[in-house]
Image (tube, rainbow, N blue to C red):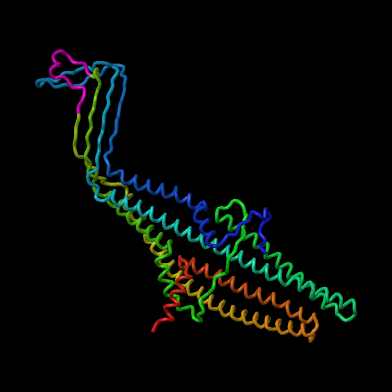
Amino acid sequence: MLYGLPGARAQRRVLTLQKALSLGRSENPLKSQYKYAMKAARKSVQVQKSDYLPNLRFVANVGHANEAPRIPVELEKDTVLARLGAQNTFTSRFELSQQIYAFGKTRHAVAAAKYQSKSMGAGYNQQMFELRNKIRAQFYQSIYDQKLDSIYSAIIPFARKLTEINRVRIKNGVGLSPEVLSSQADLQDMIARRASARNDYRKALVQIAHLTGQKTVNFDTRGQLPHLPEQKNLSVYSNVLYRRALTHRSDIDQLTYQSKQQKALAKSISAMKFPTLMLQSDFSYFGPEAFGYYSNLSSRGLKSYNWRVGIGINYPLFSGFKIRSQKKRNMALAQQYQEQKYELKDEIRTKIRTLLKDLETLQKLKKSNELFLKQVKANIRILKTSFKNGQIPRLTYIRAIIPKASAEAALVKTRSQIAETLVQLDAVVGTDISAILKNYSFKKTNEP
């Protein structure tokens, strides 16, 4: 029986692990956040690429002077002063500039922007994988809580019956008070454990709803806990899992892109020490009344428009060590990301080995719990036969059933710990390792 949050039971649906993972990919707010972040990153690339395109600008000026100024005009080796035609003036100008060569400054800036975009993509993949692992962890927790609920729900009626029998025996003068107290304590402990399991199940459902973008908890989970391959020495998977981690961990890729981004920025900044060549052109218009001409200047007066074209150069001679300091800063950041990547790789290798050792220990514990549960069930079957044949009283038979709850709970707990450790191992490797373990185990067993 499933116990979820209060609500319309008829409307509750069954949620499998695959459905929960699918909802997490499509409904979690992380997807929309990444959409806008990547849009901003693509625009950053376009901003850097804009330096490759020509720059066209229009400038207009309307002015007023309290006195019309004079300008020198040279006529046949004589210089005279020509008065502006009006105190109100109008000038306009179109300016066109095009970068010709910048020694790689723009090219490296574009590369840095692209690496930034790739870094964001790797970061999103890492966050989505972490989200997937959180959903799996909560889903397995809900399955574990359901199993505990079922275990204690099945045993509680026998515990109640045992308590009733001991009370009757007390009344008949053949029982002892400690027996009643012990059976009551066992009953209350099982009821409390079942209540705790149901409460934990509700909490797991709330977490799953949050992670999958569901506004209400109108579902119950259904599924099984994962299993390990039957192999004593799991450390043989260490190297293959480490190699998979190097190719699947998105945070390793993210650190790589961040390092390359800083190196590209350093190259772009370093190119600022070299001159930038620009093609420059402008067309100016001064207005019909911009100049007043004397009669002797009419044939040689100034035109109201002109244009020019040329090549300009921008060469920074001294910037207060700004360029050198910025370059060193970016190179230091690039090295920092590289060191973080090396440290992360060492951490991954260590965690893989540790988790595999933990799985070996849990696998041994699981086999021990399975053996204990098998013995308890065998004892129950024997006593049940004896009870049916009238060889033992009912009290003895019911007493043998009570330890079954502890044995089953211990086994389910170990299997839940294995599932939790497998999720952690998935997180370290960066991908689902169940298929890897299965395929690798098959290859190992078929090697000549």
Q: Is residue 372 above or below residue 324?
A: below
> Which quarter of the figure is the C terminus placed in?
bottom left
Residue at left offset 24%, top offset 50%: 103
Residue 252 position by quadrant? bottom left
In this view, the residue farthest toward the left is 76
- Across and down, in percent, residue 332 comes to 37, 59
In this picture, residue 371 sits left or right of residue 313: right
Query: Looking at this view, is 322 or 87 the one in front?
Result: 87
Magenta segment includes 303:
yes
Query: Looking at this view, is 78 or 381 the one in front?
Result: 381
Q: Is residue 352 above or below residue 265?
A: below
- Across and down, in percent, residue 223 comes to 58, 66
Residue at left offset 30%, top offset 54%: 267
Q: Which residues are magenta?
A: 291-306
Task: Please say whether residue 391 is visible from this viewpoint.
Answer: yes
Residue at left offset 52%, top offset 68%: 424
Query: Looking at this view, is 448 or 424 the one in front?
Result: 448
In this picture, residue 270 sits left or right of residue 207: left
In this picture, residue 398 sits left or right of residue 226: right
Residue at left offset 38%, top offset 53%: 117
- Across and down, in percent, residue 124 comes to 45, 56
Magenta segment includes 381:
no
Query: Looking at this view, is 328 or 434 the one in front?
Result: 434
Residue 333 position by quadrant? bottom left
- Across and down, in percent, residue 414 comes to 60, 74
